[in-house]
Each structure stands twice: as structure tokens, then as C-alpha cells.
Image (cartoon, rainbow, N blue to C red):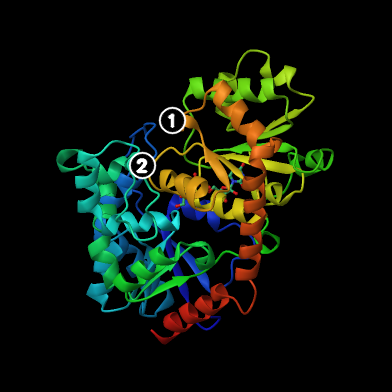
Amino acid sequence: LPNCSFSFIGTDKSNAILFPKPHIPNNIKAYSISDGIPEGHVLGKNPTEKLNLFLQTGPENLHKGIELAEAETKKRVTCIVADAFVTSSLFVAQTLNVPWIALWLPNSCSLSLYFYTELIRQHCANHAGNTTLDFLPGLSKLRVEDMPQDLLDVGEKETVFARELNSLGKVLPQAKVVVMNFFEELEPPLFVQDMRSKLQSLLYVVPLPSTLLPPSDTDSSGCLSWLDTKNSKSVAYVCFGTVVAPPPHELVAVAEALEESGFPFLWSLKEGLIGLLPNGFVERTKKHGKIVSWAPQTQVLAHDSVGVFVTHCGANSVIESVSSGVPMICKPFFGDQVVAARVIEDVWEIGVIMEGKVFTKNGLVKSLDLILVNQEGKKIRDNALKVKKTVEDAGRPEGQAAQDFDTLVEVISRS
Ligand SMILES: O=c1ccn([C@@H]2O[C@H](COP(=O)(O)OP(=O)(O)O[C@H]3O[C@H](CO)[C@@H](O)[C@H](O)[C@H]3O)[C@@H](O)[C@H]2O)c(=O)[nH]1
């Protein structure tokens, strides 16, 4: 839409990361609003603290961003496209009398939970952890133990972030469009049907097959050339995304498992965490292991040498893994990650969840053996390749993603 102006409202910090990047078209301009973090406040370890502080700033903060954009462009805002859980953006859209388009960026299936909150809470209060939630359309494999804590916390325990999420069942039907960051072709059909019956419009936009995914930043750490020296499907790639980190004893268990199993491994591990690894681990595993603080993940997963992804199941990691046909060993931490892990293990059958959702040396060695070499893992490996094929087909010009993209462009340009 070269004739439309897009004002991207973010915090100073997020804009500073995004906007120096190449490929940003000229008609997108960034405006910064408050991140809600009080001056001098030191953030704790809880990954959602930042979100809570930002969400507390409410609609006034967003209004300020819109005022900045309107003053500079001398144009009126005609449509708001926002992260679904920033629900105050709906109120801003209503005040301005413009359509609200909500983006659901976490793992897609987790959206269902916010339409069945009360039923889920009752079910969880009365059933054991391994009981399935048979009443969830298309997601009857989900279990009580897979339910995000944020969904179950009520009263004083409910954070601002949780409150926003838990209100989505009422809020999202007011969106002109809800956009999923996933492939409709991989969703359980009953889930999609159920969501469509509750929303004005549901579009599946964005991801393309791995070959077309935008490249991650350069391979300055030499991951790809290192992978070139390894055998096909032999390497375990380990990465837990940008937000979470396993507790120290689990990091040690991962290291011990990688050392004991002897499989080649590539580990993207934040610099500050290397000191937590067992003494001498880096030196001892130098021959078959490589640790970097940032890997070009999309290309790593698309590399033929990678045979398994040890992941926290963040939505982008899942998309990148399924696009490349790489089976997963799942260690979800919170929220949508836990739901995705269950879908990976029990719906697509392209991976396994760590027992008890905890890393232990023996547990991880067992899972690596299963996926990389054992005959019993063949079905998982084959399924991962089938899923890759589905994604490739879904990304073709005549596929649903391309059609939904055109529909979204039309909705925005008409508003
Ligand atoms: O060394 C690295 C590490 C990460 N990445 C990229 O960073 C992104 C990480 O995204 P994701 O897998 O979604 O993880 P997080 O950013 O940690 O995920 C947060 O955001 C997701 C999307 O809303 C949610 O699904 C998660 O629960 C939440 O933790 C991916 O594109 C990776 O390719 C790299 O390229 N190299």
C-alpha cells in the first residue's frame, strides 16, 4: 500500500531495535510512547513484568502516539492495527470511530482458551492434571496441566496482562478482523470453524515457506559454515528465544545431556548464562559443539544438518521449525508455549514434550536419541516432513495465505 502512511507506535527501546533495519519502506514511520517503566525501576526476572507496566499506561499513552503521528503527517488515522492483547487500542479505535484490526501473535491455538475461560477454570478446579479438555473444539488433546497459570489466577493474583488476555473472548468479536500469524492449513479444522463463528473475520496472514522467510541477521558467528561440516539431520539446535531462560539446574542438565549423548549441537545461549554451565563443559565439547549468543535461526533450521530443535515453543520458533520440517523437543515455560507443545506432541505428532516439562539429563538424552536416531522416532521425523510440505503448499501464490493477505490489504485500504 505505497499510497497509505503507516505510523508505527512503539516504545523507544523497541523502535530503536526495529527501525534501523534495512527493508523498512518509506511510508512506515515510528513514533515512541512511554514503556511505563518508572524512572530508576530495575526490572525483575518475570518476563511479563515489562508487559504489565506497559499495559498499565492505558489508552492515554496510545492516544499520545496517535497525536504525534497526526501532527507530523497532517493526516487522520483511519484504521488501527494492534497487538490483540493491547485491548486499550480497541477503546482508542472506538473513540476515533475507526476499525480495529487485532493481531494474534502468540501460538494460534492458544487463542481458543480465552473464549472458554470459565469452563476451563471449573474443569481445572475439579480434575487431575492429565485430564483432557474434551469440550475445546478441535483441541480436545489439551490437558488441565497445559493451561496457562495466567488463565487460572483470579482476584488479586490476576495481573494486568492476564486481565487483558482473559477479556479477549469479549473484546475480539469487536475487531473488524483478527489476524493469525500462522498457516490455516495446519490448524485443527474445528478450532478454525469455532473461532470463525465467534469473530467478525479471521485471516491467516504472514508466514511463508522457509526459503522465503526473511533472513535473520548475518552469520557473523559462523553457524552456517559450521553446520556445513556436519552430517545430514545429525545436529541438535538448542534455543529458548528472546524472553525466557531455563533455571540454572536445568541449564546444567541440558549441558550434561549434550555432553553425554555426543550428538553435534549448536546452542544459542545468552552470554550471561554461559557461566552457569558445568566447569570445563565448553572446552570438553569443543569438537562436536558450538555455543553462540545469537544464531541466524531461520537459516539454521533450514540447514540440512539440523535434525532436532530443542525449543521453548515460542510462536516464531514453531513457525520456523515447521517450515523447515525439523522435529522438536519441547520445554515450554509459560502461556501459549505450553499449548503449542501439546499440539506439537499430540496433534501434529512432530515432537515430544520433556517429561514434567523439566530438563533432566536422562530425559533429554532419551528424547535426543528418539528423534535423531531411534526407529521409534521415525514417525515423528516423517510427520515433520509432511508438515513442511503442507506449509510449502500453503505458501504458494494460490494458497490461503496469499488470499487472506489480499483481503487484509483491501480492508486497510478501504478504511
Ligand atoms: O539466537 C537466536 C535466538 C532467537 N532468534 C529469533 O528470535 C525469534 C524468537 O521468537 P519466539 O520463538 O516467538 O520466542 P520469544 O520471542 O521468546 O517469544 C515471545 O513471543 C512469542 C510470540 O508472541 C510467544 O509465542 C512467546 O510465548 C513469547 O515468549 C525467532 O524468530 C528466532 O528465529 C534468532 O534468530 N536467533
Residue 263 drawn above or below residue 321 = above
- Judge left or right: residue 268 versus residue 135: right
Rendered-image quadrant of the C terminus:
bottom left
Q: Give how far across and how far down residue 259 sits, in percent.
A: 68, 21
Residue 328 drawn above or below residue 216 = above
- Judge left or right: residue 300 versus residue 126: right
Q: Nearer the viewer, mark 2 or mark 1?
A: 1
Is residue 409 at least partly visible in the picture?
yes
> Type of residue at label 2?
Thr
> Type of residue at label 1?
Gly
Q: Give how far across and how far down residue 153 sits, in percent.
A: 22, 41
Q: Residues within 10 Å of mark 1 (few under 14, many from 20)?
A: few
- Disc 1 element: helix
How far apart marks 2 and 1 lie (CA) works out to: 23 Å
Q: Earlier in the sequence, mark 2 or mark 1?
A: 2
Residue 165 drawn above or below residue 7 = above
Residue 356, which numbered label? 1
Q: Is mark 2 within 8 Å of ligand 1?
A: no
For disc 2, the marked residue is 48
Q: Give how far across and how far down residue 302 sits, in percent.
A: 71, 52
Q: Give how far across and how far down residue 235 sits, in percent.
A: 72, 37
Residue 53 drawn above or below residue 293 = below
Q: Residue furthest top?
A: 279
Is residue 57 at least partly visible in the picture?
no
